[in-house]
Amino acid sequence: ENSFLRDIVLWNNGDSGCDPLDELEYAMLIMTSEGCWENVHPDHLSVFDFTNYISSHPTANVIESFVDSGVMVYPSNHSMSFFEEIKDNRSLVTRVARYGDKMIVDQLADKLALNVDPGVLIALADKGTIMLENLVQRNRGGGMLVCGSPNEVAPDPELDDYFAVKNIDLDCVGCQDNYENYFAQKQTVLALNMLHAEDQLCQRMAWALYELLYVGTTTMPDNTEGNLYSYDIMTRNCFGTYDQILKEMTFSPKMGEQFNYIDSSATRFHWDAWYDETTGVRKLVFPDENYAREVMQLFSIGLHELELDGTETRDKFGREIQTYDNVNIMNNARVMTGFTYTARRGNTEELFRATKSRFEPFRIDIDKHDFFPKQSIEDGWIGDRYPLCEDLPKHHFLKIGATYRFRGGSSIPTSQYMPASWDADEKIKRFVLSPDSMLYKKLCDPDPAGNCNFSNVVTLDENLNCFGNECSVDSVIIAQISPGAFYEYIRQPCTHFSFYNNGKKVVTGVSKPSPALEWKYTHAMCANPLTAVAARSCCGISVIDRIEYNYKFEYHGEVVSAGTNEAICIANGGTVCDPTSVRAYDPMAEIDPEYNAIYPSQNTYFWTDTPCKQQILVRNDGMVAIVHEPQANPSVTARTVLFVDASASINYISVPWNRDTVTGEARFPTTSNECGGGACTVFDDKCLCDITIAENSVFDALPSSSDALQFLHVGAIDPAVYDDRSYSLIESAEGIEAYALSGTSAINSTSTIFKVTGDFGEVFFLRNLVSQVTVGGTYVLRNPVGFIDLVKVEERDAEFEVDAFLNHLTRYSSSAPFICKRLIQFFGISNPSPAYVERVVKSYIGGFYTHRGTVFGDGRYGSLAATAAAITLDKESLAPVIDEDPVSGNVREPLLKVIHLMRSLRFERRPHIKLRYGLFDGLRSKIGQSPWEAPDQFSFFSGDYATPGLIASSELVSPESQLLSISNVIGLTNGLFSLHSYGLAVADGGLGPFLTRLPSVGDYSSSVGFLTYTTVNDISDKINDLSTLMTAGRLSDDNKQVLVDAYNYFAKAHGADTGERVLLQLMSALPEFHTWNTVRKTGLARSITPSPPKASNTYKAIVFINLFGGIDSFNVLTPHSNGGCYLYDDYFEARGGDVGVGLTLDEILPIDGSSAGINGCKTFGVNSLLPSLKDIYDEGRGLFFANMGHLHKPCTNKNWLTETRTDLFSHHTMKAEAHRVDAFKEGDGPGVLGRMLDVLEDYGLAVSATSVNAHSIMIDGSPTTGRLSTAMDTSGVPRVYHREFLKGNQQELRLFLEKLHSETQENSGAFSNQWSQSFIDIWNKTDTLVETLRGIKLSTDFSSKAPDIDDISKQMKLVAELIAAKDQRGNGVNRDVFTVYMGGFDGHSELKATMNNRLPALDNAIKKFWMEMKAQGISERVTVVIGSEFGRTTTMNSNRGSDHGWGGNYFAFGGDIKGGRILGEYPLSFTDSPDNPINLGRGRILPTRSWDALWFGVAQWFGINEPTDLDQVLPNSQNFGCDLFTDSDIFVSGQSTISGCGGVVETTDVSLYIPEPRYLTGKEQKDICRIAVLSSSKQLNINPSDSRCYISNQVIQESSSVPGSYEVSGSAVLNFDAYIPKEYIDKKKVNSVAAAASAFAADFVVADAIQITEAPSSSPTGEPTISPQPTSSPTPGPTESPAIEIPDQCLSILDGIRVVSSSSSSSKNFYGLDIGSGIASAGNFFFDSGSWVVLGTGVDIWGNSDSFHYMYMPTTGDITISMFVSSFTANHPWAKAGPMIRASLSPSSAHYSAFVLGSGSFTNQYRQCDGCTSVNDQTGVISLSSVWLRTKKTGNVLESFYKGISDAEWIPFGGTATIDYGESFYIGIAVTSHSSTTELASACGTSFETTSSLCSNAITESGCISSSLCQWGTITEKCYDSSKLPQEDASEIMPSIFSAGSTVETFNCADTDETEIYAIDGMTDSFT
């Protein structure tokens, strides 16, 4: 109805319209029925939106001028074609409307992004007109007041207060100073809710959820509304489901900004958007990975697999099992693409005149979202168990569950694409429902008068019949109910196979070469003919090969299946073809379908009948791209759509290839295997493969529900929904039902649908179908499924995909226990029992919790109502007896203590105090915790933190103890004291804001509020009441008495009011208030942890600057182009080139890089923002350590996954690994610097550990030392202060505070003890430290013009002050370690901006600290190391950031540093290729040096040089061989080397057979190397410290010699010390060392392994000669032995044995005897407390007579001998040592024995009767003779067993023999050298144990007495075990020295010639 303009459409042919030659003419006159109209330009009198154009062309000031005037004067320097070009780019210029158009208000509002602003719409409706203004005018004032967020309420004018909002137009100089405190007011709102809300459990759950799903003020710090909105998600859903919270938080801008996924884009988007057609250059960037990782690690599944009870699931080797890997992260990152802001509405807080909303839920820009299928973390697909879209029933928009969303007057859908211009275009054909339609009636819901009652959402509850046009369509997008009333149809989530049979070519795009030529399509791809994804098309209607697109369409935007299209076309006399030309079916149907490469959602495709081939393009890393190859049309020059074009696509996805059963490696075609041996074709450096698709049924019979869930992956529609294909139930069982199409009863059809109840009570419909894709005829994959069809990409489907992804995470097996255990901890139980966790988890999963008949929860999975009830009402929460457990409860969070006290003691705000004043001020610096102020996204503390001492040594955690710094403990104490004295004010360290003045005690006029608690006057009743309120009744009687005494004292001395006030202050200092623990006192004062005395040694200090977040250190140390260095260009291109994140040459400072050793690259660069690093480096006092990071051992990009068992790329884990430097957790303390201090403290040095602003485990030592590190804060060192009674000489309060925190018993609460000890130590320390630091005056001014980010300069200043006070702290300090913290380096977005923001502050801190150290004259004794938990990717992500990497470059400086060099191996290439040995893909660089390498040299400089001590500090350093830095590498003064390095390096093979295909674990490799080192020391006669070893290059293959086994082989790399001559290293001996190590490992290290070696034969090769009976009697006790060489291991055992006479209690039971002939040298034995050494010669134990040495005792009854053989040394392979049970001491006696052999094997031998022939039953192969052996006699049956060092179970071996021993016999250890020479064999061990079970049976007195294990009871006359003799038998008179037969011998006396004999100890009197 435009009175100025008309749209007139004519065909451009001479028959029925204009002549084609007139198309470009203008000013023609056209006569119509309405009169004559003049032809004008199509854009005449049109309104355009140039916002995007201006923002991307800031210099276009000519065009920009119209922004202010509203009228554009077209610039003369541009032709009109330029305007046509930018107009066609719809992302730059948008056509809004035309002058004179009458529009439905909603349509125009949608154009202008006003449709989300109801206030504007209301104003338009009221006024009927709209005034279009420019952007500045429209945004001035921040919008208008309209309805807002959920639960938002209008201001209450009676409160005389207002809510300050952030508004740029008001944010002028001085404006906000008058009234705004933006940061404080959001804290105030939250605190007031906590204090006064009636739903306290909801508030408590909300806070716990907030800590779990933490979002801070790293984004929008000043915004109040945006921050509170995110917290409102927690309170609004506190009793909802966790799913809902996680989804809302995921769509929250707060979360998106904090984790950087806002505007993260798919690789495809940038690849296509930045395509330069002239050069072919594209830009490769990747989606941001931050949230992709943290949503798993922090918010759902955690790092490790968990059992239902929250305990970690372990593999067979006891190792944690990781829940996800880096491939999962990259897949998740693809899910989290396309998230963007919604338009800002009115009535919201505004920042930066934004048009975007920063708290309304995100929307997903589908064109920036990744379209392709995503793998799940279980190697399936996120789309698994969802129905296929091709299975949707006909007219699914009319079926049960169909959902419609009301769009009001807008005909444009919100989650599906339609051009915005269609909304205002009357030519557009809409889908209008008939009033007679059943669907119309459902959506209209008419009243009796026929007026519609529209609902926001309508979901059909029954199947409807189609009516009219509904019967002609496959689906609906927008349904018009009436003019101005539209509904959008949201079909149910469904998925698409990536590959399908009978693919059809679909075409899009129109080329218009000239009016005289036919239009051609420009692009083509494949489509599944069964899905409705392309528009109608028909050929032959007017021209045979011309397609009529949108042929007989029902509405604009309609898509149909190929079958529907063909049916309509054929019915009207046409055919479907691959056309030579295209045109619209009629003028009104023309939609100008030009191809849009950047925004594929805007493309409309049309069906053809031409086949379309699908292929897979396989990269050498196994990633694949989906490829379409449409059949070519010789008449059309068209190209394949870019993102499925083999030559253009970059869209690679991971797929679950089948794995090699031996190596576990994925099997796929690569160029290195000739693309599968010719199965595929080499295409560039990839493999292009043809595919075939097979669809088969999975089950032939009804499966169990568990099998169905495991093996069926394709979802199905509920059979009840179908009415065109009727399904019926044919079979059922528990948890499963089978439905088949009518007329069939067999289950084995692919159409069969199973209804299955899942693990969490959810119902799934699953189709009996598996679709498999065969690649290249060889490799088989399960057909990937995804939500987004590549032809018709829609935002709706991206939303479905995100929903499925989040649901997949929350239903992962570890998710429920992870979430529940964390919530229990946040509720106050640090160490919940596994049973408690499991009960809560079951309630979370089941959705219900029942307590005393009351049911909580609604049955939904993840019910937080049920979870909260289960946590708070569980018996472990309610049972008082739990308080008796010393480790129950926790150290309470400081903020909760403050809120608790204020609520319990009835805090009230003072009248007229405004919200804008704030309630608190400086909470984080004072108490360590404040809402929105956690130090990072890991919240306020780590859930696995354990304080050194009892907590850590008991393997418990105390997360909140991480906040127990000096500042926090004292700040909280002073803050609570102040609250009682002045109200909530700032006075004396108070927690409130400063208002007016410093008040006097008891004056609340300067506070924002005060406590109003009053109670009875009786002091006992008062304390009992306060005990209930503040300690839940846990207050101990001892502390009650202290409080009574204190009250009486202060009330009497200072008045009742003072007594009351001091009582409350002491209540707030109670350990029972600060912890949920009971207290049991000893009655003694608590000791202060003493300071160690200072030694005379010089002082040294290590300072570690922790750059948290993972600094991008490849933008700290870079290559430089000087000298033509190739590496700089390689670096710059890898980092994204000109639009990337790499540093340009003018952003780096050149340094000498020749030490890096890279050819042609003598110059390197340092970031220009860090000039101090260059200066220190050039000064020769700074070192770079290149490409360093956490490693378990040296590895490559081929084996890093198997050789590095840790949670790589995780902040939390990698920070811990970098600070622990203990890969296998073998050390005594968690921190590398803490372990250094442990060693140095043992040396007698005074040590100190201090962390500043953030505690670090790096400085924590062994839990057993009890040494606690000091945690300090830059806010200053406070002291416990009370203006009246803790000030100067006024210390009246001290005594009572000390009594409250006095010593506790061992069974007292561990957490209360922790708090009290921390309080007493900190109190004592600060009293002196404050005075000490006051006297320190530094020479250097640490201030800077740059902002001091994270107070890093203040932190370094504090360290400098502490160093200056080294002699005054405690007793003086010899060794100091410090850690300082600077965060914010997690540069996932705008990396350069992050570095520009933070590096200047870091530079100032480094510069000033270095100046100060030199000024103090101590720089040579201070070393500073700058490090971060990991490096970052060298490739860029879509937010111009970098993601988590691995290796990084770090810096150390100090006066003793041998600087000006780059140590380590800087990457030689940044190429992201599998051929780059240190590039893991995606730009992740594999470290070439471990942290061990750096700290090894630093530890030596610090004074630790003994190899054993270095191993204590760096337990894993041996695993790197000699690849470590020494102090001589790093320091000028360094002189140390690495023991076992510098000499020969030998590599030898190590091989074993194992029953399963796997690699050796890291621990197994280390154990094998330990054995090899010990073995080499013996073989080569060197010290064990003279060699080092690690295993490399593991290979697995099927064993050809041991069927069913697998051979795992590797190389043992042995390094030898420089002093050992090369010729001394015998290769044969080295090989034997490896053979021995692998042999030992086969039985005792590697589970179930078999050594690959030649074992001894099954029987001895020769018969020993028969020996005559012994000629001598047994020799009691040890006898003298010849001088022999005893192995070191036995010598160490011998040193610990007291060599005593036979009357000694330790050896009186054993005797020694050489049995048989051929004894060339007398044997000997030594024994004490289980440790033993036996030496012997002898010909052999074999045949029918033996020759050996026997350590023995007589015994009787049943007996078991268990002994550990540590070492056996002999020269003959058939030498023997082991336990023997012998009938007599005759050489030919029957015996049963288990022996280790000199050959390295073990055997079972026995002789069943006297003089019989011996039997050998040999098994097993070992080395070094270290083994547990056992012989067991039960009656007359004898058995033998063995086990390895760390095995738990005894393994039977050998034969079972029957021997009649009679009533008594002998047991002991036999040793024979199998030699007639004098050479002794030696065996030793640390355990010999015997157990007897028949002493108390009815055996004779003589038999009992003959057994040394039994004792005869002379009173009871029975036989007993020696240890179980009854009291009456044991009470007989003991013999004295005067008894007959007693003798007196000298004992431990000095052998002198003097008459007097003195005891060697020198302490006893002389005697003669």
Image (spheres, rainbow, N blue to C red):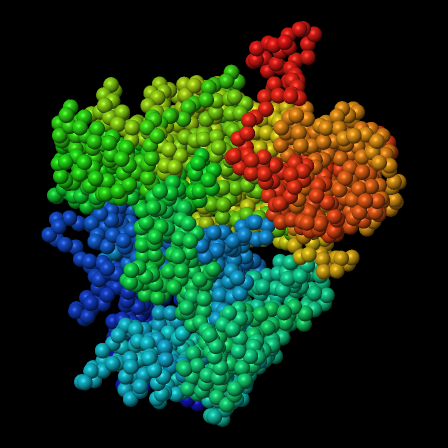
Q: Residue 1915 in the image: state x and y as whole percent.
A: 56, 35
Q: Residue at x 18, y 85 (%)?
A: 449
The residue closer to the viewer here, 707 or 224, is: 707
Query: Residue 131, how many percent across, how many down?
Result: 22, 65
- Residue 1711 shows up from this direction: yes
Assign the C terminus to one quadrant of the image.
top right
Q: Residue at x 59, y 43 (%)?
A: 1896
Residue at x 60%, y 33% (from the top left corner): 1511
Q: As drawn, is 810 to the left or to the right of 3?
A: right
Number of marks in picture? 0
**Taking 1858 as reference, is 1521 above or below it?**
above
**Is residue 1140 positioned above or below 1681 on the image?**
below
Q: Residue furthest left?
A: 158
Q: Residue 1586 at what x, y percent from top left?
A: 70, 31
Can you tell which quarter of the image residue 464 is in? bottom left
**Can the viewer see residue 1404 in this picture?**
no
Residues 828 and 1727: in front is 1727
Is 83 left or right of 163, judged from the image as shown? right
- Give whichever of 1060, 552 is nearer the camera: 1060
State the image coordinates of residue 1501 (x, y, percent, origin top left).
57, 26
